[in-house]
Image (cartoon, grey):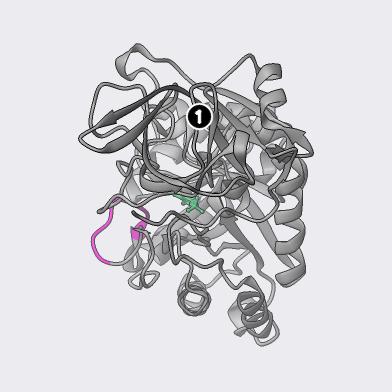
Amino acid sequence: MKAFGPIPPGFEAIDGELVISGRKVSDIANEAGGTPLFVYARELLEKRMADLRAAMPEQLSIHYAVKANPFGPLLGTMAGLADGFDIASAGELEMALAAGMAADRISFAGPGKRDAELEAAITAGATLNLESPTEARRVLAIAERIGATPRLAIRVNPAFELRGSGMKMGGGAKPFGMDEALVAPLAREIIASGAEWRGLHIFAGSQSLDSAALIEAQANTLALAALLTDEIGAPLPHLNMGGGFGIPYFPKDEALDIASIGIALGERFADLPHALKDTHFAIELGRYLVGEAGVYLSRVVDRKESHGATFLVTDGGMHHVLAVSGNFGSVVRRNYPIAIATRFDAEAEEEVTVVGCLCTPLDRLGDEVMLPRAEVGDIVAIFATGAYGASASPSAFLGQGPAREILV
Ligand SMILES: *Cc1c(COP(=O)(O)O)cnc(C)c1O
């Protein structure tokens, strides 16, 4: 038997069945037209943001990283909850604008932005977080050609990194941002060109459950921003301090202690270096805001035995939840939180391996987990799948097609 990750708070059973936003999952699946289906709970999105705001200093803006989940109705909700969106492509720019986010609250980072994407962002009035001096030159040339004033920030590749983070995106040689030594000369060039100087973006890592490591990274970020601002010699309007707040996925993972992060940041804000006295601060979070509000539902289509093991075969799979199968940046496969949604309060009584419908041994959704006995027709729920699920999985694999998605 192998353990599985913790089921997030906010889910309960009515008549033995999992309910999301007060509704039974079988009713939600009927309304959506069937399984496989991602269900996102609006009330959990709202609660997460409210709790986070209560923990963080008031002057800190909270941005949503659209990459985590760009589903239209969810983005519409997030546009009303977040202070800004961070995007990484012209496709996400269109989605962000369609969701109702104002262009001047959108910032666009990401390596390899094409000229057409740069032009779309300049025209819309979004901030471009420049990833290299050559990208900066392309932006300035495009802005001059179309007669627009671009809003520009510089993404820094910090020399430090977020200790123990799931995906490292700072420290050492990286394709993201530019090395510290390149920043001040380029910033001065941008200011001299007449572009609108928006400030710095420093993102040090992702998926951390270690509040001490995040507090340390934020302190390093503020110190680096102050140093660079002194070097640039002009006020810093805005600092995007990155994010990195993680959520529990696996056995023994514990929820992040946001209260201690908020207190530490409040103390820093009360004692800012002179260079940052008039700076506006933001953090950018993806999975922390939406991950635990999402549940992936698939239905059992077969139940079979092989050499003493029981397999539940569902109509879902890794083509929708690549990370659950352990194939999205994980070194070892571990079990996400999983349940039989249609027997949510029943005792676990048998060890099963839950697989998807793809003809590959990689397609595992729950490996040797103890669950209530399930039959064909039962619904399996996999939790913590609101981020990097539908849009980060190869839905065309084996001709299966995308999952349904619904916000309730
Ligand atoms: C991916 C990404 C994020 C979001 O990361 P999460 O782990 O989902 O919070 C934020 N900022 C940047 C620059 C990113 O690349």
Instruction: Decide which of 65, 308 is in the foreground and name it.
Output: 308
Instruction: Decide which of 79, 44 is in the foreground and name it.
Output: 44
- Is residue 171 covered in magenta? no
Residue 307 placement, left or right of 40: left
Q: Position of residue 328 (x, y in %)?
A: 33, 43
Judging by the rendered image, the residue that carries numbered circle 1 is 90
Furthest residue in direction left, as rendered: 307
The part of the chain drawn in magenta is 172-178
Say what secondary structure mark 1 lies in: helix
The N terminus lies in quadrant:
bottom left
Q: Which residue is drawn at the image coordinates 64% and 37% (left, top)? A: 125
Instruction: Decide which of 165, 159 is in the foreground and name it.
Output: 165
From where the camera sits, is residue 209 visible?
Answer: yes
Up-down relation of residue 238 to residue 363 (above or below): below
Res 174 quadrant in image: bottom left
- The three-letter amino acid code for the residue at tag 1 is Ala
Q: Which residue is drawn at the image coordinates 41% and 29% (left, top)? A: 115
Residue neighbourhood size for the residue with mark 1, other residues' Cα within 10 Å, grouped as few (<14), some (14–19), many (≥20)? some
Q: Which residue is drawn at the image coordinates 49% and 61% (left, top)? A: 244
